[in-house]
Amino acid sequence: MPPGAARHVSAQARSTRRFFFAAGHRYWVAEWSPAQNEKTFGRLTIPHGHNYMLDVTVRGPIDERTGMVIDLGELKRIVTETVVDRFDHADLNADPLFRDRVPTTENIALAVWDLLAPKLGPDRLGGVRVWEDATLFVDYSGRATGGASRGGASGEASADMDGKW
Ligand code: NI
């Protein structure tokens, strides 16, 4: 086989960019009594804030011309406009995204995914990691879809969360 006919396989990579936002929240389920909330969440029922870190990973082939998986300027613009501008210095409990769910780190990761997936494409969005502080992070990489999954016999479920300890 002549060299020029070698099968071309594009190199895949994952690029991650980090963002920051400060936001307030408290853990509270409206349908529960104050006693039930306090029993379940303790001092987390008191409004307080965190300096969150958010790592957004984009996956895909490395573009042969630009050498990039994604224009990192474009990624910065999308995440800033979609997530950071919305959550920074916000009361998360007042955001409609958390009307029916407690703004835990898990649910923030879910909300960030749901905001970014339509903008970046669920195939391109490789995962989000939300850090509540230096000791706690949650990873989320999308719900399992019923559709065809390339390279996986069973359509590998990709919804997972870990990091909470
Ligand atoms: Ni908190």
Image: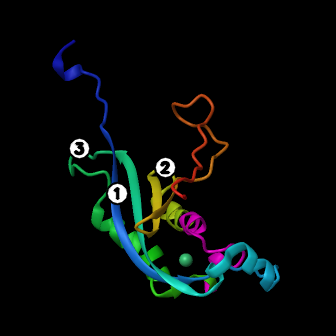
Work out whether mark 2 precedes mark 1 in sequence or the reverse, and give the earlier one: 1
Quadrant including the N terminus: top left
Callout in the foreground (1, 3): 1
Label 3 sits on residue: 64
Quadrant including the C terminus: bottom right
Q: Nearer the viewer, residue 156 or 7?
A: 156
What kind of residue is marked 2? Answer: Asp
Q: What is the secondary structure assignment of the residue under circle 3?
A: loop
Q: Residue furthest top?
A: 1
* Mark 1 surroundings within 10 Å by alpha-carbon count, few (fewer than 14), some (14 through 19), many (20 or more): some
What kind of residue is marked 3? Answer: Glu
What kind of residue is marked 1? Answer: Thr
Residue 56, above or below 90: above
Q: Nearer the viewer, residue 23 or 36?
A: 36
Q: What is the secondary structure assignment of the residue under circle 2?
A: loop
Residue 86 appears in view: no
Label 1 sits on residue: 16
Q: Is 69 covered by the magenta stretch?
A: no
Q: Is 101 covered by the magenta stretch?
A: yes
Magenta-colored segment: predominant secondary structure: helix
Give the residue at x 49% y 56%. Answer: 121
Label 2 sits on residue: 123
Q: Nearer the viewer, residue 3 or 74?
A: 74
Give the residue at x 40% y 67%. Answer: 134
Work out whether mark 1 precedes mark 3 in sequence or the reverse, and give the earlier one: 1
Query: How far, Cα to Cα, is label 3 from label 2?
Result: 19 Å
For the record, the magenta segment spans 94-111
Callout in the foreground (3, 2): 2
Instruction: Tell me if label 3 and label 2 are in contact, CB under 8 Å.
Output: no
